[in-house]
Amino acid sequence: MTWRAAAADDGTVTDVARREGAFRLHEEPDFARFWTGQSISLIGSQVTMMALPLTAIIILDADEVDQGLLFFCQYLPALLFGLQVGTIVDRFTKRRLLVMADVVRALLVTAVVLLYAVDQLSLWALMFIAFLLGAFDVLAAVGGQSFIPKLVPEPRLMDANGKLQKVTTFAEVSGNSLAGLLVQALTPPLALLVDAASFLASAVTLGRVREAGAPVPAADGAKAPQALDGFLFLFRDARLRYISLCNATSNFFSAMMVALYLLYATQALGIAPGVVGVLLTVASGMALVANTVTARSTRRLGVRGTLVAGQLVMAAGCLVLPATAGSMGVKSVLLVVSHSVFVIGMVAFTITQLTYRQSVTPEYMQGRVHAGNHMLTYGSYAAGALMGGLVGDWIGMRETLVLGALGHVLAAVWLLPRRAWDTQAQTGLEEADVHS
């Protein structure tokens, strides 16, 4: 029984499918190696997520607009190259692409440290490197999402994605604390060396993953892979279309907040970078609870209900952030509460939408479909980051954070048309192919 076959018209998943899909890492050795590589890389990347913007803030005196531009540069490649990357992933061996992405990102992160060491680091140089990092982040993200269905059978996709989400949680739990300590002890640029080492370690681990066979060819009569195929696949299917639009809207408003988060926490709230890292670590531990909540939610609420609930929970968590005030102790507690609630909603939404998309996409289309989704969602993220910096400079950081929080409610509106979930008008699922 597949995850897709076990889904009713409203997207609910039966207990039988859930039980059949559970597995232990030793039962899927190649997935275990992939999982290990991701664990190592994500810890280092979490350091960069704090160290890169803090380098701009502390070393280069970046303001709200500069922070928005930095995040914009990092996510712009998803918009520019997302569709082309999907075609590349479908044509070539995914393992080699992932190894290459890790090695190149290690070199780019090291370049920041070298420029700082010779006193040549500038905001423009940092933005250019962030752009290149973003390009290979797209390759790694699309390649990784497309690789998972080749490493585990379809009934195990939900559990595989859940295990990877736990990796992300562990990375946040350990990476935020590590980042905060390294930034204070070594300065932000030198902290990036940890990420460079993690990318190289991940490349070595991924190199040991066995990828069965060559890339799967398209069905008989299909045309050669085209960049737009994945994007069209998403929009020909009603459910995938609404999920993608919800995801894009959510990312746009999340990016408005993320672009200002560290600036707001360190300057407006007066919390030291090391303390921010520890507080985020405590809050990120809630993602372990969120994995259990997601499993129960998809059984009781279905895919649609879980996605809507995820967005509303994210909105609730985000609204706490601009309301943070009082003594340092009160502000610290509210920061933890805000991020904890947000993480629960984010994990539930992420696991559910990713598993659904993987389960209904043919293997030969995996790269292009995930690339189309990545382009839409992270292209929106790039635009949101730029907008966050500009609006924050215009009306203030606190007011911009309120707008970002309310945006998650707007994102949930895309999922309200029930007719898309009550019918089988899903040309991307069973009936139509983009190669027709």
Image: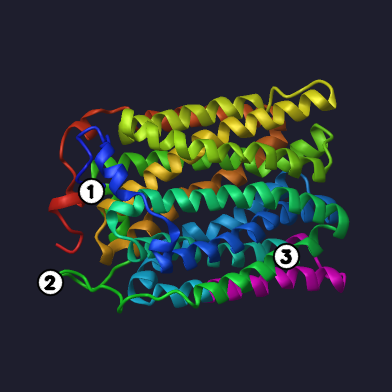
6 left or right of 148 in image: left
Local packing at callout 2 (Cα closer than 10 Å; few below 14, some 14-19, many 20+) is: few
Amino acid type at circle 1 is Arg
* Residue ID for mark 3: 194
Residue 258 lies in quadrant: top right
Amino acid type at circle 3 is Val
Nearest the viewer among 104 and 156 is 156
* Residue ID for mark 1: 236
Could you say which disc has been placed on residue 297 in the image?
none
Residue depth check, mark 3 versus mark 1: number of the one nearer the observer: 3
Question: Residue at left 48%, top 77%?
Answer: 208
Q: Which colour scheme is used?
A: rainbow
Q: Which SS class for mark 1?
A: helix
State yes or no: residue 288 in magenta: no
CA separation, marks 3 and 1? 43 Å
Q: In the rendered structure, which segment of residues is drawn in magenta?
A: 100-125
**Residue 307, how many percent across, how many down?**
39, 34
Amino acid type at circle 2 is Asp
Question: Residue at left 43%, top 42%?
Answer: 247
The reply to whether residue 352 is visible in this rendering is yes
**Residue 298, how many percent across, how many down?**
34, 35
Give the mark, 2 or 1, whose residue is nearer the N terminus.
2
Q: In this view, does 184 lie above or below 344?
A: below
Give the mark, 3 or 1, whose residue is nearer the N terminus.
3
* Residue ID for mark 2: 220
State yes or no: residue 115 in magenta: yes
Local packing at callout 1 (Cα closer than 10 Å; few below 14, some 14-19, many 20+) is: some
Nearest the viewer among 334 and 370 is 334
382 left or right of 149 in image: right
Give the mark, 3 or 2, whose residue is nearer the N terminus.
3
202 left or right of 299 in image: right
